[in-house]
Image (cartoon, grey):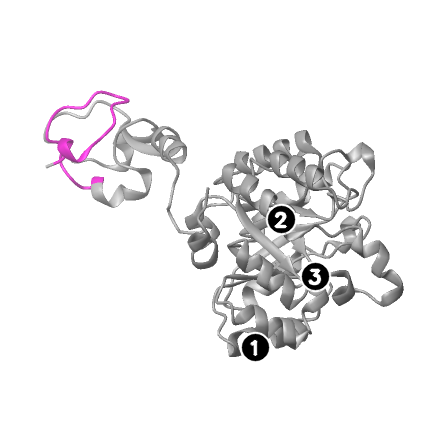
Amino acid sequence: MPSLDQVFSESLFEMGRPYVVAEMACAHDGSVERALSITQAASKADALQVQLFHAEELVVPQEVPAARELELAPESWKRVTQKARADGLDLWATVFDEEAIDLALKLDAAVLKIHSTDISNPFLLQACAQTNLPLSLSAGGSTVSEVASAVRTLEDHGASNLILTHGFQDFPTAPEDARLGFISTLDRLFPYPAGYQDHTDGASDLAYTLPLAAIGLGARVIEKHITDDRSREGTDYISALGPEGFAEFVEKVNAVNGAFSGKCPDDFSEAEREYRQSMKRRIVAGTEIPTGTTITKERIDLLRADDGIKANRLDVVLGRESQRSLEPGEAITEDHLK
């Protein structure tokens, strides 16, 4: 799997494949056992992303009781973290308040995620930056100026390892609202890698294909929601994949590994080199060419062959004498020429 250093410092083409984050969000519905089950289902990803918050610090008072039902205690998160690490997953933590940041640090989170809710929250931005951890900044539903302002705040307070993640959560997000082109915009405007967080309907084929398209546009990190059982229709299920669907999703991401390479000129794959060897036209003897004969265009053909000088190097052949006799159809090499 790509390392975090690669995610934040190397291009997608150097990484070889994007980094997959399994987003649990609140799909656990306040149950640690369900959270552990979801963590198990995420084992084929590179990281597990959890949401740490305190209801009183997140929503208005009348909504606190409902939000509190989705909280997990620190000891429960410790169990989830231990399970994630046992399965080889990095821990990414979306933090919504400073107490949540403290918990994320105690859990030894590898990355802090800043939700688009807080892209204009200077207090949380500063607190996250001062941890010196890599940061994932959600740019979903945000203007370029809001993203730029948040980036400046983070930089001013010491942050340097950033990733800017496009995608917003509707219920579900319609394909026309995915606006995948904004990934390229982020990549062009900011000196940080871009990612994509997918929120299309988990029951749709687009839940698989849109993230693959995002990879083609340069997304180095793909966040995908996961739940233990879509049929349960619990919190955050609408854009989530169940265990089998998530495993299939990771397989699809791995299957397109390398398909978006080719950014470096002439950086051919082995299969492409074999294709060039067998399919490109080469210079062959069109008639019998006796030893010492000056080779002219009337004496050659340009045909597919596994050997011989390539057709675009006619100047190397024409006007030179043959070193030995050549049979019709025999590929001409440098060794055949005086």
Mark 3 neighbour density, 10 Å: few (under 14) some (14–19) many (20 or more): many
Residue farthest to the top, as pictured: 327
User: Residue 198 location in percent, x, y?
Assistant: 69, 49
Prevailing secondary structure of the magenta residues: loop
Q: Earlier in the sequence, mark 1 or mark 2?
A: 2
The residue located at (51%, 54%) in the rendering is 108
Chain part drawn in magenta:
317-337
User: Residue 285 location in percent, x, y?
Assistant: 25, 27
For residue 152, which numbered disc appears in the image? 1
Residue 138 shows in this picture:
no
For residue 75, which numbered disc appears in the image? 2
For mark 3, what is the residue?
Answer: 140
Give 126 or 98, whichever is nearer the viewer: 98
Amino acid type at circle 1 is Arg
User: Residue 122 location in percent, x, y?
Assistant: 65, 77
The residue located at (50%, 61%) in the rendering is 134
Give 163 or 226, whichever is nearer the viewer: 226
Amino acid type at circle 3 is Gly
Would you identify the image quadrant in which residue 137 lies? Answer: bottom right
